[in-house]
Amino acid sequence: MTINTNTLVSITEANQNFSRVARLVDENGAAVILKNNVPRYLVVEFGQAESEQLAADEDVMAISKRLIEKNRQAYEVLAK
C-alpha cells in the first residue's frame, strides 16, 4: 500500500482536530493516523470500505465456483 505523506496525522492531532482528518479523507480518499510515529489507523470513506467488502465477497464466490468445478465428480458421488 502506498501512503501519501500529506495524509499522515499524529494521533494527538487527530484527537484534537478530527475535522482536519475528515477533510483529508474527503480530499485524498484516506488518512493515516500515526501512533508513536508508526502508521496505526486508516480512515476511509464509508462507501470505499463498503466497496472493498463487496470485492472480498466476490473473490470468495469466484474461489467457491472454481473449487466446485474442480471437484464436481466428488460432490456428485457425495450427493447420492
Image (cartoon, rainbow, N blue to C red):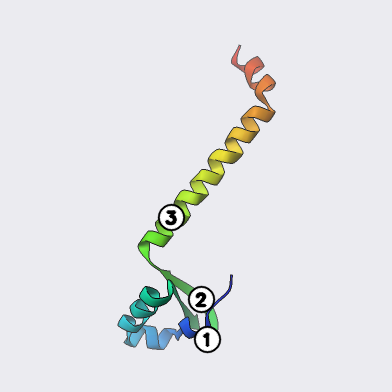
Nearer the observer: mark 1 or 3; the answer is 3
- Tell me what residue is drawn at x 34 percent, y 84 percent: 20
Label 1 – label 2 distance at C-alpha = 9 Å
Contact between marks 1 and 2 (CB within 8 A): the answer is yes
Looking at the rendered structure, the kind of residue marked 2 is Arg
| Mark 1: secondary structure | loop
The quadrant in which the C terminus is found is: top right
Image quadrant assignment for residue 47: bottom left
Expressed as whole percent of the image width and height from the top left, the position of residue 76 reads 63, 17
Q: In the rendered image, which residue does mark 3 sit on? A: 51
Looking at the rendered structure, the kind of residue marked 1 is Asn
- Tell me what residue is drawn at x 43 percent, y 84 percent: 11
Q: Residue 19 carries which label?
A: none
Residue 57's place in the image compared with 40, above or below, is above
Contact between marks 2 and 3 (CB within 8 A): the answer is no
Expressed as whole percent of the image width and height from the top left, the position of residue 63 reads 60, 40
- Tell me what residue is drawn at x 55 percent, y 77 percent: 3
- Tell me what residue is drawn at x 59 percent, y 16 percent: 79
Looking at the rendered structure, the kind of residue marked 3 is Ser
Expressed as whole percent of the image width and height from the top left, the position of residue 77 reads 66, 15
Q: Residues within 10 Å of mark 1 (few under 14, many from 20)?
A: few
Label 2 – label 3 distance at C-alpha = 22 Å
The quadrant in which the N terminus is found is: bottom right
Count of numbered circles on the image? 3
Circle nearer the N terminus (2, 3): 2
Q: In the rendered image, which residue does mark 1 sit on? A: 36
Relative to residue 78, is residue 32 drawn left or right? left
Task: Farthest residue to the front: give it.
Answer: 27
Q: In the rendered image, which residue does mark 2 sit on? A: 40
Image quadrant assignment for residue 26: bottom left
Circle nearer the N terminus (1, 3): 1
